[in-house]
């Protein structure tokens, strides 16, 4: 059987319990067709880069699948028909990753450092405001243009 990583985006107005119910439904589809579901990671409610069906945010979920192509096709067919699923993407992989995905590692690092990811927390970076630049004294216009006196 083939190995896949599958990510789908659910509507922002669903509750986390409804998203979990969607995951359980699609797990059932995979297992009924002879496949299995490995890890499932809920990445939470995240902002979208652009609006999709009037949604500015979506619940992201990652699933590791081991299934025949027919099971994957049936799950994707049902996701395409569902109004709760905005987008989905499946990638065939050679082997499933061990441990947490890159998205979950990023979240853990952020929580360990206590950062919120806001614009005000820039660390050691210098400010890039207009008032901070020191360009030196301005030259008179005649000298700047190389004009005659």
Image (cartoon, grey):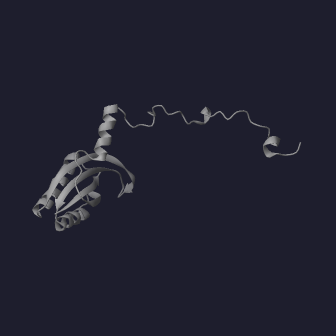
Q: Identify the residue at horizontal 22%, vertical 50% (top origin).
A: 19
Q: Is residue 14 left or right of residue 116?
A: left
Residue 28 in picture, x, y percent from top left? 12, 58
Q: Left or right: 58 with respect to 95?
A: right
Query: Depth check: 148 or 20 in front?
Result: 148
Q: Give the quadrant of residue 50.
A: bottom left
Point 24% across, 50% down: residue: 97
Horizontal and vertical percent position of residue 113: 34, 32
Q: Quadrant of the C terminus?
A: top right
Please give the name of the residue rendered at 81% of the width and 41% of the height, measured from the top-left corner: 143
Position of residue 76 relative to residue 22, above or below, is below
Q: Is residue 135 left or right of residue 31?
A: right
Q: Is residue 115 above or below residue 36?
A: above
* Number of marks drawn: 0
Identified at 16% across, 65% down, the residue is 68
Q: Is residue 12 visible?
A: no
> Quadrant of the rendered structure where residue 137 is?
top right
Question: Does residue 89 appear anywhere in the picture?
Answer: yes
Q: Nearer the viewer, residue 95 or 37?
A: 95
Q: Quadrant of the image for the N terminus?
A: bottom left
> Between 13 and 75, which is closer to the camera in this rendering?
75
| Vertical side of 107 occupied by 36: above or below | below
Q: Residue furthest front?
A: 94
Query: What is the x, y in percent for residue 27?
Result: 15, 56
Residue 135 in the image: x percent, y percent?
Answer: 67, 35
């Amino acid at each position: 059987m083939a190995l896949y990583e599958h990510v789908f985006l659910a509507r922002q107005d669903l509750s986390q319990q409804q998203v979990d119910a969607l995951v359980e439904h699609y797990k059932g589809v995979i297992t009924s067709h002879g496949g299995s579901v490995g890890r499932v990671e809920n990445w939470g409610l995240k902002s979208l880069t652009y609006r999709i069906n009037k949604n500015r945010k979506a619940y992201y979920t990652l699933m590791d699948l081991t299934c025949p192509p027919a099971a994957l096709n049936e799950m994707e067919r049902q996701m395409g028909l569902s109004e709760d699923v905005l987008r989905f993407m499946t990638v065939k992989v050679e082997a499933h990753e061990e441990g947490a995905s890159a998205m979950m590692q990023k979240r853990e690092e952020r929580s360990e450092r206590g950062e919120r990811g806001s614009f005000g927390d820039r660390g050691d970076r210098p400010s890039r405001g207009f008032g901070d630049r020191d360009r030196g004294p301005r030259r008179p216009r005649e000298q700047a243009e190389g004009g005659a006196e």
